[in-house]
Amino acid sequence: MSGLAVASPWFAALEVGEGVTRLSEPHVSDLVSANLWWIRGRDHDVLVDTGLGIASLREHVPEVLEHDTLAVLSHTHLDHTGGAHEANRVAVHALEADAVVSPPAASLDPHTELELLGLALPGPGQLPESLLEALPAPGYDPAAYAVRPAAVTRALVDGDVIDLGDRALRVVHAPGHTPGSIVLLDEDLHWLYTGDVLYDGTLFDQTYGADIASYVETMRRLFALDVTQVHPGHDESFDGDRMRELVDTYLRLRADD
């Protein structure tokens, strides 16, 4: 795309403590700038979500995939699954495994992507020309973008435990945003990784595959979890009190729908 500079490095990294690093892609639109959570364990690591796949994880942040890393996908939208094909092991809820093996169409054109998600288009001038704000490499062609297929090595269900050796993550099925959305609970730290199920911003519950009634039940379940820190799929982390405020706000908005 003409006029865009090449950005290096592509990924930004922030240590959040307890052997956890947040990776992000700062050179893309806020609409698709997702958080990737690299969680180090004694026996292997977990990477919660894999970004857009525009730039190679193995080339830019190879250490993230070096310790027998399991890529755990919170759901299968493009900004969370694009790099999954680079991981040797991939886990996703069983309801969305097919979308990893045969990804749906995706686009870096915001108008096209909103249509693919089933969202109404805003008025003229309210969307950027591209979801890219820089290029990952010289000659990169945004029009050729697609989410590449990946092999699913573990199909997750509610209550599964992902054991890293010295820490564990419990899978909580959290449908509503998508049928197979999950959150991951570190029950020792009381940390919750929420993907797009919950973040401090506008939640999308009317895209294709979304279901408000399921989202309401998910929110009620989240409210009951013992959580002190939330690491979401977008924007900044927040504490358990803020989580309950956000959940309460959503329930007040949607409980009668």
Image (cartoon, helix red, strand yellow):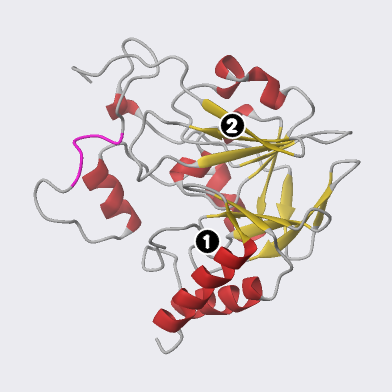
- Residue type of the residue flagged with mark 2: Leu
At x 36%, y 33%, the residue is 28
- Residue type of the residue flagged with mark 1: Leu
Q: Which mark is residue 198?
A: 1
117 vs 15: above or below:
below
> Which is the main secondary structure of the residues drawn in magenta?
loop
Name the spot of residue 17 as percent of width and height, x first.
72, 38
Spatial separation of the CA atoms under disc 2 and disc 1 = 20 Å
Q: Which mark is residue 38?
A: none
Q: On the image, numbered disc 2 is attached to which residue?
A: 14
Secondary structure at numbered mark 2: strand
Name the spot of residue 157 as percent of width and height, x first.
73, 62
Numbered marks: total: 2
Task: Name the residue at the bottom extreme.
Answer: 256
Q: Is residue 130 magenta?
A: yes
Contact check, label 2 and label 1, Cβ < 8 Å: no
At x 57%, y 23%, the residue is 57
At x 73%, y 65%, the residue is 158
134 vs 103: above or below:
above
- 194 vs 13, nearest the viewer: 13
Secondary structure at numbered mark 1: loop
Question: Residue 70, located in which quarter of the rendered image?
Answer: top right
At x 65%, y 18%, the residue is 62
Q: Which residues are magenta?
A: 127-131
**Which of labels 2 and 1 is toward the front?**
2
- 30 vs 131, nearest the viewer: 30
**Left or right: where does residue 13 sit relative to residue 71?**
left
**Left or right: where does residue 162 sit relative to residue 29?**
right
